[in-house]
């Protein structure tokens, strides 16, 4: 009999040599790798083949035996559906193991036949613990209640581990209070922030048999002082089901004091200029962000004042434009005051709320604080805009190719800002165009930041005009502190002039000189000045009513023209005898091309119609300042002539009076010399004539 047993074992050994595994040996299979990690599908060698361990009856005793056989202290987790986690390969025997837990190998346990065990869906698995790693650190721990952070880029961050019954366990569920106590226990400031596992250099799925709860204000100095309860009596002789394994353990970041941080000070970070960015506050030497809940313009105004922008207009952003920061999130319903004594936070919680500033204080330390707890959804960002002196309620369109189109901007509190395109339509654009002095013709409304993003804030959203308003300020709308709008959703408009096709006018200091403008499709545009001739100018002056003028020909520098207009015509060729520009040869461009030419055309046509009397547009000429000056000068000359006539008339009366006196005959004298009398009369006439 002994010889038969010896022969059987020899045959098994021979087969194992052929097929590469030793009878009864165990390995862990993890998605293609073997024994590379401390977890996987359990496979054992039988008849030279690796077979998946069957999950029927697979529990802590069987898992512990398998892990000890592999050199571990024991098992932390057993899996009855290992193929879902680690995959499976090889054969499956129709037998399952039943162990007491004290065995040294699976072959020492009893086995029973079960037909379905041959299916790979019946594979069993384990998570082992206690093996010495490459750094000579054991996965077990000796000081119960101690904590550590692993996997982070620095010592102050990582997955939180807690020493429980000789092994490091993780937490799948952890609150901000518990995270804060853990940071205090590790020697950091009483602030904690949850971070994403993707922010870590590395992490491993662990197990979480514990629940923990600290006091509402995290007054404990270590986690062991908090209420700790176990969902499973964990030890090396006992383990937990895979349903209690922790697929997403909690990772936190702790903070140390910053020497550059003074309690109560504020700063703006991540902005492109000094006066914009995410609001951060220094509490107990740690910079942290501010929760957006309850934040308003008064709070923002105090921050701007504290930063030195006393006269600025604050605009709040709630869309995370400047990030959420690496520090804790401190306050909700901001009311700055004795912060730092009880303040701490994590990603979604804030212990300080109902914080209120009246807007007149110069520092956040002067505001009121109330304690409480809230959930924070967003952090505050802020821009302190310096007033530009624009007129309140004024509008403008800017950054279009021509002056008829562009991004709509409004003046609020002395700052130019844009309008969100939520609810924006042609009726709203019509009111804006009317306010700008354009015609009543229906404009085009633009959406999606067609004309770019403003450097100023987004002032309005959900503008709703009825069409009868005289300004956008009279329309219903939502102001900037009550909505969230991104920079790719800015409204624009294209306004029409309301002129007739072919109409021309001169845009200059007076009506008979300036840049030649022509109307095409209700838009005033200009004419290319390239090869512009005297004959062209002659026709322009004639069409305007200056028939006898001698026009001065000039080409205006388009790049210096602050009125950007479409270039509708080029290559204009007139003979000088035409009655209007319509009769001349020319190239006419459609609006979309004409707008592009506004950027590329260097010179535009200009004319001065000199020495002429208009036959049309006389009403317009009567308003000419030169004409008015000539009228005033003529009136002065007329008055002077009248005064001179009065003086001359007075002198003539005096002379006539003297004449009558000298020509009266003297009774005592007889004139006998006729020639002498003639000479006197001639002299008298001569005197009169002089």
Image: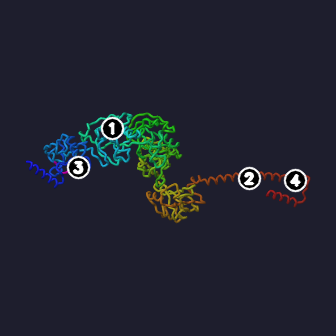
Q: CA distance from mark 3 to mark 2?
A: 128 Å
In space, the residues marked 1 and 4 are separated at their CA atoms by: 152 Å
Q: Which residue is mark 3?
A: 29
The one of 65 and 317 positioned closer to us in this rendering: 65
Report, in whole angstroms, how far the alpha carbon at label 2 lies from the one at label 1.
121 Å
Q: Is label 2 in contact with label 1 (beta carbons under 8 Å)? A: no
Earlier residue among tags 4 and 3 = 3
Q: Residue furthest left?
A: 1
Disc 1 element: loop
Disc number for residue 665: 4
Q: Which residues are magenta?
A: 86-92
Label 3 vs 2, first from the N-terminus: 3
**At which x and y percent is residue 468?**
46, 43
Which residue is at a point 9% across and 50% down the rendered structure image? 3
Question: Picture coordinates of residue 304 (x, y %)?
Answer: 49, 42
Q: CA distance from mark 4 to mark 2?
A: 33 Å
Percent x, y for residue 437? Answer: 50, 49
The Cα–Cα distance between marks 1 and 3, rounded to whole angstroms, is 33 Å
Residue 405 numbered tag: none
Q: Residues within 10 Å of mark 3 (few under 14, many from 20)?
A: many
Which mark is first along the chain, 3 or 1?
Answer: 3
Q: Secondary structure at mark 4?
A: loop
Tell me the residue that label 2 is attached to.
Answer: 645
Q: Is residue 190 magenta?
A: no
Residues under numbered marks 4 and 2 in contact, where contact means CB atoms less than 8 Å apart: no
Mark 2 residue element: helix
Q: Is the residue marked by circle 2 packed among few (<14), some (14-19), or many (20+) residues within 10 Å?
A: few
Label 4: few (<14), some (14–19) or many (≥20) C-alpha neighbours in 10 Å? few
Q: Earlier in the sequence, mark 1 or mark 4?
A: 1
Foreground label between 4 and 2: 2
């Amino acid at each position: 009999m002994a010889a038969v047993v010896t022969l059987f074992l020899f045959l098994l050994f021979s087969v194992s040599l052929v097929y590469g595994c030793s009878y009864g040996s165990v390995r862990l299979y993890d998605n293609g790798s073997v024994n590379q990690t401390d977890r996987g599908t359990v496979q054992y060698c039988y008849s030279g083949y690796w077979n998946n361990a069957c999950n029927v009856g697979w529990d802590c005793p069987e898992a512990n035996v398998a892990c000890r056989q592999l050199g571990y202290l024991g098992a932390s987790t057993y899996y009855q559906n290992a193929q879902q986690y680690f995959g499976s390969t090889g054969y499956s025997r129709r037998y399952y193991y039943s162990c007491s837990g004290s065995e040294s190998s699976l072959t020492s346990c009893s086995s029973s036949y079960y037909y379905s065990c041959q299916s790979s869906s019946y594979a069993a698995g384990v998570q082992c613990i206690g093996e010495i790693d490459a750094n000579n650190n054991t996965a077990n721990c000796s000081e119960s209640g101690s904590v550590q952070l692993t996997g982070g880029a620095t010592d102050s961050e990582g997955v939180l581990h807690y020493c429980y019954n000789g092994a490091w366990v993780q937490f799948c569920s952890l609150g901000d209070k518990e995270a804060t106590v853990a940071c205090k226990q590790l020697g950091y400031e009483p602030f904690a922030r949850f971070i994403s596992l993707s922010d870590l250099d590395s992490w491993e799925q662990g197990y979480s048999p514990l629940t923990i709860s600290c006091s509402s204000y995290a007054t404990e100095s270590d986690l062991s002082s908090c209420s700790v309860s176990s969902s499973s009596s964990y030890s090396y002789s006992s383990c937990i089901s895979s349903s209690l394994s922790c697929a997403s353990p909690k990772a936190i970041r702790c903070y140390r004091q910053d020497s550059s941080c003074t309690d109560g000070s504020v700063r703006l970070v991540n902005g492109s200029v000094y006066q914009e960015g995410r609001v951060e506050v220094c509490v107990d030497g740690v910079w942290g962000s501010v929760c957006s809940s309850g934040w308003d313009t008064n709070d923002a105004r105090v921050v701007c004042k504290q930063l030195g922008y006393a006269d600025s207009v604050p605009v709040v952003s709630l869309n995370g434009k400047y990030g959420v920061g690496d520090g804790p999130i401190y306050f909700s319903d901001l009311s700055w005051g004795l912060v730092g004594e009880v303040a701490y936070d994590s990603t979604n919680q804030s212990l300080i709320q109902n914080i209120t500033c009246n807007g007149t204080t110069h520092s956040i330390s002067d505001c009121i604080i109330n304690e409480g707890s809230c959930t924070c959804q967003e952090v505050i960002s802020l821009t302190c805009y310096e007033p530009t002196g624009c007129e309140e309620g004024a509008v403008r369109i800017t950054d279009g190719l021509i002056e008829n189109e562009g991004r709509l901007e409004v003046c609020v509190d002395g700052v130019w800002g844009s309008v969100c395109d939520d609810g924006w339509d042609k009726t709203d654009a019509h009111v804006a165009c009317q306010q700008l002095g354009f015609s009543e013709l229906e404009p085009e409304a633009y959406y999606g930041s067609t004309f770019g993003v403003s450097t100023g804030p987004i002032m309005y959203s959900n503008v709703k005009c009825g069409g009868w308003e005289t300004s956008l300020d009279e329309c219903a709308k939502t102001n900037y502190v009550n909505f969230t709008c991104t920079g790719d959703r800015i409204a624009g408009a294209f306004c029409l002039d309301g002129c007739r096709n072919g109409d021309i006018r001169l845009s200059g200091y007076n009506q008979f000189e300036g840049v030649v403008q022509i109307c095409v499709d209700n838009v005033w545009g200009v004419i290319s000045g390239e090869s512009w001739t005297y004959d062209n100018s002659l026709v322009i002056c004639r069409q305007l009513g200056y028939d006898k003028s001698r026009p001065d020909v000039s080409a205006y520098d388009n790049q210096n023209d602050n009125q950007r207009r479409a270039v509708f015509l080029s290559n204009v060729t007139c003979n000088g005898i035409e009655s209007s520009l319509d009769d001349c040869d020319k190239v006419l461009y459609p609006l979309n091309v004409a707008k592009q030419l506004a950027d590329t055309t260097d010179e535009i046509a200009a004319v001065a119609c000199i020495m002429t009397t208009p036959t049309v547009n006389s009403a317009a000429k009567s308003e000419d300042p030169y004409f008015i000056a000539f009228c005033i000068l003529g009136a002065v000359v007329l008055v002077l002539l009248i005064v001179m006539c009065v003086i001359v008339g007075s002198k003539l009366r005096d002379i006539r009076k003297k004449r009558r006196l000298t020509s009266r005959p003297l009774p005592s004298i007889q004139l006998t010399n006729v020639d002498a009398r003639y000479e006197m009369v001639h002299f008298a006439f001569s005197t009169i004539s002089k």
